[in-house]
Amino acid sequence: MSEVVKKPGKIIIPSDQVYLQELDEFLEETLRNFSMAEGDIADVAISVTELVNNAIVHGNASDPDKMVDVEMILKDSSVEITVTDEGDGIDLSDIPDPLSDENILKETGRGIFIVRSLMDEVDITAGKDGGTVVRLVKKFDPVK
């Protein structure tokens, strides 16, 4: 099994949900260093954790030999985060509308919907070497 790799603003984890707690701690520490308010930190942490969980389960099919890469870059008064998996990619038309009548009572399928409501920008694209890349942007006023 692969190991967690941490660098400033970047963490790479094996595709196993056991690493989500370590991811969350890394996110919160890094975002506090960016001087983000606790509410903004929570929005980003919820969003990234949801996307990484999707990358592990759906993208990489929980294959511990495949990795999920999370990178955060501070840009003026915003943070840009990319989440990249090594799966087969995603077809956005396969994502059901969680607000449609047939899905409204389902307990799953709301992750992307929630992420879009918490973040200022969400872009989902195919990776150049396969997999899926999700780019997020959260604007914030730095805490003094």
Image: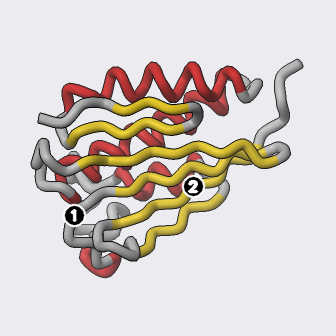
Query: Which residue is depicted at the point 53% across and 67% down?
Result: 123
Instruction: Indicate the quadrant containing the N terminus: top left, top right, bottom left or bottom right.
Output: top left
Disc 1 and disc 2 in contact, CB within 8 angstroms: no
- The label on residue 79 is none
Give the residue pinned by disc 2. 136
**Residue type (three-letter) at the residue carrying disc 2:** Leu
Instruction: Indicate the quadrant containing the C terminus: top left, top right, bottom left or bottom right.
Output: top right
Query: Which residue is depicted at the point 77% across and 48% down?
Result: 75
Q: Is residue 130 left or right of residue 125?
A: left
Label located before the other in sequence (1 or 2):
1
Q: Position of residue 12 (x, y in %)?
A: 36, 40
**Residue type (three-letter) at the residue carrying disc 1:** Gly
Q: Choose between 138 and 29: the one closer to the eye.
A: 29
Query: Which residue is depicted at the point 63% across and 28% down?
Result: 31
Q: Position of residue 50 (x, y in %)?
A: 36, 43
Q: Is residue 81 left or right of residue 62?
A: right
The local secondary structure at tag 1 comes to: loop
Q: Position of residue 110 (x, y in %)?
A: 34, 53
Q: Is residue 95 above or below residue 50?
A: below
Q: Is residue 122 left or right of residue 70?
A: right
Q: Residues within 10 Å of mark 2 (few under 14, many from 20)?
A: many
Give the residue pinned by disc 1. 87
The local secondary structure at tag 2 comes to: strand
Of all residues shown, which one is farthest toward the right? 144
Q: Position of residue 13 (x, y in %)?
A: 30, 37
Q: CA distance from mark 1 to mark 2?
A: 19 Å
